[in-house]
Image (cartoon, coloured by chain):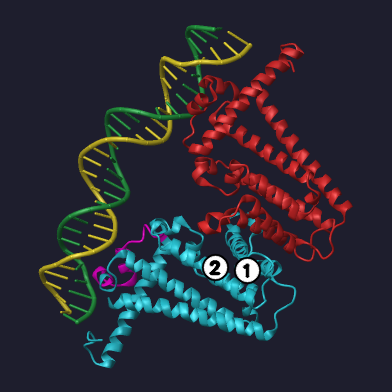
Chain colours: A cyan, B red, C green, D yellow
Amino acid sequence: MASQRKSERGQTEERSKREERADRILDAAAELMLRWGYNKTTIDDIARYAGVAKGTIYLHWKTREDLFMALMRREYVRLMEDIQQRISGDPEGGTLHGITKHSMLATMKSPLMKAVLLRDTDLLGEWTRKEYASPSYSAQIAQSLALIELLRSRGVVRDDIDVRRQVFMLDAITMGFLMIDQYMPDDFKYSDEEIVEMTAETVERVFAPFQQPDEKTKQEISNALISTFDDIITLRTRIDQQEATS
Amino acid sequence: MASQRKSERGQTEERSKREERADRILDAAAELMLRWGYNKTTIDDIARYAGVAKGTIYLHWKTREDLFMALMRREYVRLMEDIQQRISGDPEGGTLHGITKHSMLATMKSPLMKAVLLRDTDLLGEWTRKEYASPSYSAQIAQSLALIELLRSRGVVRDDIDVRRQVFMLDAITMGFLMIDQYMPDDFKYSDEEIVEMTAETVERVFAPFQQPDEKTKQEISNALISTFDDIITLRTRIDQQEATS
DNA sequence: ATATGACTAGATAAGCTAATTTAGTCATAT
DNA sequence: ATATGACTAAATTAGCTTATCTAGTCATAT
């Protein structure tokens, strides 16, 4: 607060200009990382591709690692926003198979997040070993667990099996469908949408309880999820802002 | 035939001695490959570990590659025999979830075959690129397809979805459960048997039709499978013998 | 104040040679 | 006849030297 030296307007204008440039740089980083992988994407490349000088990048982030952390965080927030969007726009968004469908499809449309989830070492290179992946993965599991528990308490998921086993099964199924195309021959290729349909059907058959949830329950769950996503998103965004001012 | 110079008895005795030694050498190869991987397992190591001279190995196989092909074929035959055994000893052996259970458990107990299935490049090294893996994999798919078609025709698997999609789903599910433990944190570890139980439950819920198959049908299917396995096994064994005499 | 790009130190890669390893052979021993 | 292990040619690796790259800095320009 004491550090704000400009007028309100001037500050906001500048802030947004800076942020816009930061975004452009991250765009360049994402693009080049997908093309050449983490190891072979240099700060020089990113600067050239983003049309700024190298020094400028260091006005935004202290190190190369910081830049990529910011990139990954941005991708993660976007992923969450995308999932939230998809869930909120779907009447089936309050069911486990609906949530699974939207989470998977959003992940499939985000090459970087997919690479992290599937531990694609070709693309991630040294990033794999940078210990940000593993905590985020166990956070992922914790989220699965919380989700399943919520759905069980509402009676929209079977509760005659152990919760942890259910999480294990859900993750095995989704991971299986996410990676199987790498193993299938060309005459067994399906589109992302088709794969997600198959996953959803599998999840529904394995996890649905005898009686179908009513509309009201589905809506309540959907709302609960959406506000959870809001929490995640604002939390992450707040971290970003902290970093930016430090 | 003209090459058989010894008496019947002498020949058989010698044959079995040779075979016993070949087996010992393959045992050594398997052991060392699991320890050091394909790339770092040398013929010298194998000879020393099997207690024979290096030259002796070349009395059995023309090249290093031939030796490993023989090893992989032996593992494959053993895997098939194991699956056959497990199926024939189980009243549920004629159901898809039973078959899945036994195939998976047998695979899990065969580290080399599991490595091939999961494309474990750490263990297989250069062997991955040796083009024997890919044909065997598409053969695997063909088998899945034949199996599903058989089960559909007998009415023990749903036939209201596309067959090929069903194969895709079955493979996605089994692969998912086979590889998920690599991704799960320590507090989500389950034994092979538990994992296979979860897989079987998943498969049953996704593929079982409305009415349960009767005992007679299950028995017929089980028998059909067992004779299919016999075919595969004798075919493979015949190839081995051809190789040995050439 | 902000942005730049020449600059540097440290890391990484390329190029080369010598040393070691290893698949496969074959004269010799059993 | 069978089995062996010393042997060889080819390949792989180790060691080292030189060249190139790259993350991060900072004096200078805008």
Disc 1 marks a residue whose amino acid type is Val
Mark 2 and 1 residues: CB-CB less than 8 Å, in contact?
yes
Vertically, is A49 above or below B75? below
Q: Please state the chain letter of the residue tagged with numbered disc 2 in the rendered image.
A: A
Vertically, is A183 above or below B26? below
Q: Residue at x 56, y 23 (%)?
A: B57
Q: Residue at x 62, y 32 (%)?
A: B70
The x and y percentages for residue A171 are 58, 63
The x and y percentages for residue B140 are 68, 48
Badge 2 crowding class, 10 Å Cα cut-off, few under 14, some 14 to 19, many 20 or more, is some
* Label 2 secondary element: helix
Q: Which residue is mark 1?
A: A196
Towards the viewer: B107 or A217 = A217
The x and y percentages for residue B49 are 51, 26
What is the magenta range? A36-57
The x and y percentages for residue B59 are 58, 20
Q: Is residue B39 left or right of residue A27?
A: right
Badge 1 crowding class, 10 Å Cα cut-off, few under 14, some 14 to 19, many 20 or more, is many
Q: Which residue is mark 2?
A: A108
Towards the viewer: A100 or A170 = A170
Q: Residue at x 48, y 58 (%)?
A: A119
- In the image, residue A222 lies in the stretch drawn in magenta: no
Tally of numbered discs:
2
